[in-house]
Image (cartoon, rainbow, N blue to C red):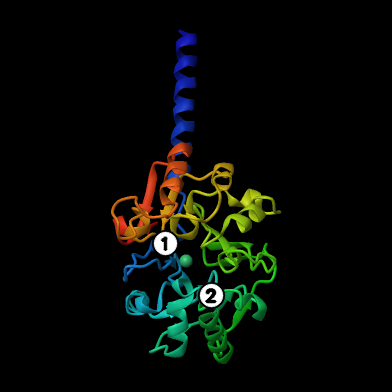
Amino acid sequence: MLKKIMLALVLLMSAGVMVSAKSNKSKKQSGFTMWQLPMQVGNIGNSYVFRTSGGKVIVFDGGWPAEQLYLRGFIAGLGNEVEAWFISHPHDDHMGVLWQILKDPQGMKINHIYHSRFSPELVELEQPYGEYAKDFYAVLDTVSIPVTDFREPGYTGKIDDFNFKILGVVNEEFHTNPFNNSSMVMKVWDDKKSILFLADTGAESGDKLLNGPYRDDLSCDYLQVAHHGQHGCKEDFYKSIDFRACLWPSAYWIWTNDQGGGYNTGNLETFETRRWMDEIGIKEHHVSCLEGLFKLE
Ligand SMILES: [Fe+2]
């Protein structure tokens, strides 16, 4: 009888432990919402918006100049005030909307801009993009908004419950694929999730990240696949870090490698990246051209 009572007590206690472990898990609060914005023109803009639990709005990149109406409307719907705007690199599919908003804010308030500025020499390495970058920097130099220029990776910050860490900055040493290889790489997280934004990180800067001091920070829940899903980081990069889901800021013609000749007839490398993700075992994919607006709590 005593044995039975003891057994019942042990069962009750372990059930209690399970209940409390479960309730602890469900107590994890989302510190921010993230939206992956669908492209508004048939091209490859990169655009993410966040709203913290305290109501602050944050933007990562923002897409092409031609997408400004959509992003202006989206931000207006959230109060028309951006606490922090992060720009990964000055290609116009990333900085284009901010570039236009700085010229003509139309009532939008931006409180802080974060980026990693290219040297004049680096800017000259790609044309016509260098000209767009020069104009973007010229506009940035005229506004009164505080700008933080990250010269070294490792900086961490917190906006309400939105935590961020800069893992990669401008890499002046790479003269192949120079703009993409100087993408600012950022990890963001709250208690519930973490997201790694690779922007257009290339093979060389991917290697640098993997062999650098912040390698352990690269693992995440959600990974923004580099360079819109193709010709970005190498296979080895993706297979060396842990993640469980992919964010694809990819146009349909990139996703299907169709440059006009039909399904998978182009010279893009998207299907290689897709195969690597299958081999890794990733089942959750958020592809902007297929899903439209994706909201993550
Ligand atoms: Fe891009």
The relative height of residue 200 versus residue 126 in the rendered view (above or below) is above
Mark 1 Cα shell of 10 Å, populated few (<14), some (14-19), many (≥20): some
At which x and y percent is residue 33?
Answer: 41, 61
Label 2: how many residues lie within 10 Å, few (<14), some (14-19) or many (20+)?
many
Q: Nearer the viewer, residue 21 or 45?
A: 45
- Rendered location of residue 28, percent (x, y): 47, 50
Tag 1, which secondary structure? strand
Report if residue 122 is visible in the image. Answer: yes
Quarter of the image where one finds residue 292: bottom left
- Disc 1 from disc 2: Cα separation: 22 Å
Ligand 1: does it lie within 8 Å of the C-beta at label 2?
no
Q: Which residue is mark 1?
A: 34
Residue at 50% across, 74% down: 85
Towards the viewer: 204 or 52: 204
Q: Where residue 145 sits in the image (x, y, percent)?
A: 55, 86
Vertical order, 121 against 178 (above or below): below
Residue closer to the observer: 272 or 21: 272
Residue at x 34% of width, y 74% of height: 74
Which disc is residue 90 wearing? 2
Query: Does 24 sit above or below residue 223?
Result: above
Q: Is residue 59 visible?
A: no
Q: Amino acid at mark 1?
A: Met
Mark 2 residue element: loop
